[in-house]
Image (cartoon, grey):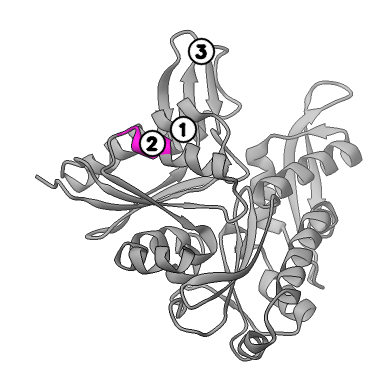
Amino acid sequence: MFSNAEVGIDLGTANILVYTKSKGIVLNEPSVVAIDTRTNQVVAVGTEAKEMVGKTPRNIVPIRPLKDGVIADYDITAQMLKEVLKKVSKKIGLSMRKPTVVVCTPSGSTSVERRAIHNAVKSFGAKEVHLIEEPIAAAIGADLPVDEPIASVIVDIGGGTSEVGIISFGGVVSCRSVRTGGDKMDEEIIQYIRKNFNILIGVRTAENIKMEIGYALIEHEEQSMDVRGRDLVTGLPKTITVTSTQIQQAIRESLESILDTVRSTLENCPPELSGDIVDRGVTLTGGGSLLNGMQEWLANEIYVPVHLAPNPLESVAIGTGRSLKMIHKLQKALK
């Protein structure tokens, strides 16, 4: 029996990733749960539940139990974790009895929010639960020298939150978290299209637009895309064409708020570490870092080199899993 499994979980607003020591990333699915409101039973979890968004009968409701990187619905998160770990143990073909679990939390989360995550993970029978701050996990996953006295700057743009952390010697020197991420950009695209075209589109359509023709605030060759939605005047389905310049305008506010967060974190950096940042630059992780032109735009705005992590979407989960080796060292640094 696999009685002492070690598992790293990235409980993201948009995706939940599970990392095991032996197999690496074993699960990467959307953090969505479909609930039958008559029985309060979980009908589907992950990809299957995401397919149902906006397409279900009245009694089945797809819910995202994590909002802005923290637990919004405690009971459903606990049920989602149980289902996810069942999936993982089936995939690995091993029993997950009393695993040691490391979960990453946003650096701006309160002690109550951390306690909720700790209890939700503990409730499905984990032997030990360790919490690690997201910027540290992202830095470990991006292969940065976290435990050395060198400044590593990580910008993690996730679904619910964007975090900027300066890490040195196993701990966070300066950190800022803003509740702006991919979800907020999707919401801004929906509002922009509603206001300018009188068309209502869904969250999944907005996400597709962002991925296809979304650009950071840089000069680029304009692209266009056909979008289908419901006309708010006639109530009938309608197709419109939107351009990448319009989408750029729609998400401008979110991008500027991320930039402000990066700037204010760098302003709080001790002068000794500023020299390292000029040499080593900033590393981008998270799904938001894959927005077209993001790297180029940030580099132009903050005048230091900007690198993309080798695997931006999975950095936090990989780092969470790897941190099992150094968790005691990290916790000493935190204390």
Q: What residue is shown at x 79% (from left), y 71% (from top)?
A: 220
Farthest residue in the left direction?
1
What is the number of callouts on the image? 3
Q: What residue is shown at x 79% (from left), y 77% (from top)?
A: 301
Assess disc 3: are there few (<14), some (14-19) or many (≥20) residues with their C-alpha within 10 Å of its C-alpha: few
Give, as a three-letter code, the residue at label 1: Thr
Query: Quick check: 286 above or below 55?
Result: below
Nearest to N terminus: mark 2 or mark 3: 3
Q: Where in the figure is residue 115, as x and y percent of width and height?
A: 48, 40
Give, as a three-letter code, the residue at label 2: Leu
Q: Quadrant of residue 83?
A: top left
Give, as a three-letter code, the residue at label 3: Thr
Q: Which residues are magenta?
A: 119-124
Mark 1 lies on a secondary structure that is: helix
Find out whether the residues at labels 2 and 3 contact each other: C-beta distance under 8 Å.
no
Find out whether the residues at labels 3 and 1 contact each other: C-beta distance under 8 Å.
no
Observer-nearest of 322 and 174: 174
Find out whether the residues at labels 1 and 2 contact each other: C-beta distance under 8 Å.
yes
One can see residue 31 in this view: no
Farthest residue in the front direction?
335
Q: Alpha-carbon distance for marks 1 and 2?
A: 6 Å
Query: Quick check: 48 above or below 295?
Result: above
Mark 2 lies on a secondary structure that is: helix
Label 2 vs label 3, nearer the camera: 2
Q: Where in the figure is residue 87, as x and y percent of width and height?
A: 29, 38
Label 3 vs label 1, nearer the camera: 1
Assess disc 2: are there few (<14), some (14-19) or many (≥20) residues with their C-alpha within 10 Å of its C-alpha: many
Q: Where in the figure is residue 43, as x and y percent of width and height?
A: 41, 22
* Label 1 sits on residue: 77
Task: Specify whether 304 is left or right of 287.
Answer: right
Mark 3 lies on a secondary structure that is: loop
Mark sitting on residue 37: 3
